Image (cartoon, rainbow, N blue to C red):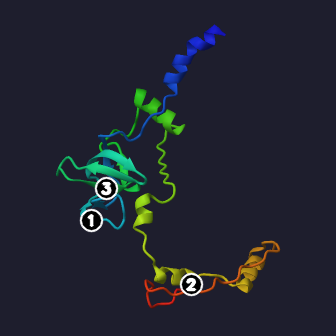
């Protein structure tokens, strides 16, 4: 059993997680995107960043990066999907340690991009506002029971017995409600 313990430090070194975005890591803008003053869509837009602009990542919060633009000295927030880690002028072929690191991260020699953001942030929930017009838009897309059955028949989907929910009752009006009806 002793030889297995001797290999443990080597295995740990080989499988250490490789962080993709550390504070100060260089990145470039993938496509034209706004620079916000805070990590929220409702935030004030500070500037429009053009594709290819270089920036440094300072922090990650949810689906946002806090970035610094070395050329102008500005700081702000951009969506993760608008940022490409590394610099735009890097070499196309990777060799040596960088190829090994790439292989360890993605399991292949190609580039893999995956961005995951779970749920809503505290700020999203705090800043949420009612949107009755959006609810009405969604209601227009609701299928009736007959429409759903017709669609299933045309698509060859086998029906399963299930009770449909009754439409919800209209909420009681309060002083804070807009004069528009929700449903």
Marks 2 and 1 sit apart, C-alpha to C-alpha, by 36 Å
Does the image show residue 110? yes
At numbered mark 2, what does the secondary structure look like: helix, strand or loop?
A: loop
- Which of the two discs, 1 and 3, labels the residue nearer the N terminus? 1
Check residue 132 in the rendering and tell me which mark sits there, or answer none: none
- Expressed as whole percent of the image width and height from the top left, the position of residue 182 reads 52, 86
Query: For this view, does 146 lie left or right of residue 117?
Result: right
Residue at coordinates 45% horizontally, 79% vertically from top-left?
131
Q: Nearer the viewer, residue 166 or 85?
A: 166
* Residue topped by disc 3: 77
Query: For this view, does 57 lie left or right of residue 126?
Result: left
Q: Is residue 124 above or below residue 72?
A: below
Q: Nearer the viewer, residue 23 or 88?
A: 23
Marks 1 and 3 sit apart, C-alpha to C-alpha, by 9 Å
Spot the residue most to the left.
72
Q: Is residue 57 above or below residue 180?
A: above
- Expressed as whole percent of the image width and height from the top left, the position of residue 148 reads 72, 80
At numbered mark 1, what does the secondary structure look like: helix, strand or loop?
A: strand
* Residue topped by disc 2: 171
Does the image show residue 88? no
- Which of the two discs, 2 and 1, labels the residue nearer the N terminus? 1
- Expressed as whole percent of the image width and height from the top left, the position of residue 127 reads 39, 67
Query: For this view, does 102 lie left or right of residue 167?
Result: left
At numbered mark 3, what does the secondary structure look like: helix, strand or loop?
A: strand
Circles 1 and 3, Cβ within 8 Å, touching? The answer is: no
* Residue topped by disc 1: 45
Query: For this view, does 110 lie left or right of residue 58?
Result: right
């Amino acid at each position: 059993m002793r030889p297995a313990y001797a290999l443990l430090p080597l295995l740990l070194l080989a499988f250490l997680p490789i962080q993709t975005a550390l504070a100060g890591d260089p990145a470039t803008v993938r496509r034209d995107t706004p620079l916000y003053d805070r990590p929220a869509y409702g935030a004030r837009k500070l500037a429009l960043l053009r594709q290819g602009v270089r920036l440094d990542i300072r922090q990650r919060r949810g689906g946002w990066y806090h970035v610094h633009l070395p050329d102008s000295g500005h700081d702000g927030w951009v969506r993760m999907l608008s940022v490409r880690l590394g610099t735009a002028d890097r070499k196309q072929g990777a060799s040596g340690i960088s190829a090994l690191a790439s292989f360890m991260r993605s399991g292949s020699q190609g580039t893999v991009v995956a961005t995951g953001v779970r749920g809503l942030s505290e700020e999203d929930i705090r800043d949420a506002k009612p949107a009755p017009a959006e609810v009405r838009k969604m209601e227009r897309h609701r299928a009736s029971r007959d429409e759903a059955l017709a669609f299933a028949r045309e698509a060859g989907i086998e029906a399963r017995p299930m009770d449909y929910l009754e439409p919800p009752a209209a909420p009681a009006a309060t002083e804070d409600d807009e004069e528009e009806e929700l449903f």
